[in-house]
Image (cartoon, rainbow, N blue to C red):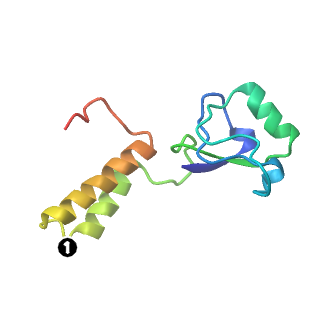
Amino acid sequence: MQKIPLKKAAPGMILARDVYRNDSPAGMPACGSGIVLTDVLISRFEQINVQALYVEGYPLKEPGAATYEEVAAILDRRFEKVLSDPLGAKLNQIYKEYFKRAMGEESGDEAK
């Protein structure tokens, strides 16, 4: 999940959290999570003064942001003391798979 300014929102992105009028969680949401953004919806958010959205994944690559390979290397270093334990190794694998999906690094070879 990534918080992005409304100005950088694009059709096809998926909301990860509910959107509220004026970015205030008081009252009913203006739009629910899981909705795919369209140009019309983005325009409506502008009209109700929404400044930022939480979208699924990491669609905007920020300057200096870590790549998946860097994140995987960090995880390996953090788990190095428990990688010989099957449960520690499995937990490391679960985290890597999570970050791979979240960072949009999925490839077609994940049928393990």
Expressed as whole percent of the image width and height from the top left, the position of residue 19 reads: 72, 46
Q: Quadrant of the C terminus?
A: top left
Expressed as whole percent of the image width and height from the top left, the position of residue 36 reads: 62, 31
Label 1 crowding class (10 Å Cα cut-off): few <14, some 14-19, many 20+? few
Left or right relative to 107: residue 48: right
- Please name the residue shown 67% across and 47% down the image: 18
> Is 91 placed above or below 6 here?
below
- Please name the residue shown 60% across and 34% down the image: 13
Quadrant of the rendered image containing residue 56: top right
Q: Outermost residue toward the bottom?
A: 81
Location of mark 1 (residue): 81
Left or right relative to 61: residue 103: left
Left or right relative to 22: residue 15: left
- Please name the residue shown 33% across and 33% down the image: 107
Expressed as whole percent of the image width and height from the top left, the position of residue 84 reads: 12, 66
| Secondary structure of the residue carrying numbered label 1 | loop
Q: Nearer the viewer, residue 19 or 2?
A: 19
- Please name the residue shown 53% across and 54% down the image: 64
> Is 102 placed above or below 108 here?
below
Q: Nearer the viewer, residue 40 or 30?
A: 30
Quadrant of the rendered image containing residue 9: top right
Mark 1 belongs to which amino acid? Lys
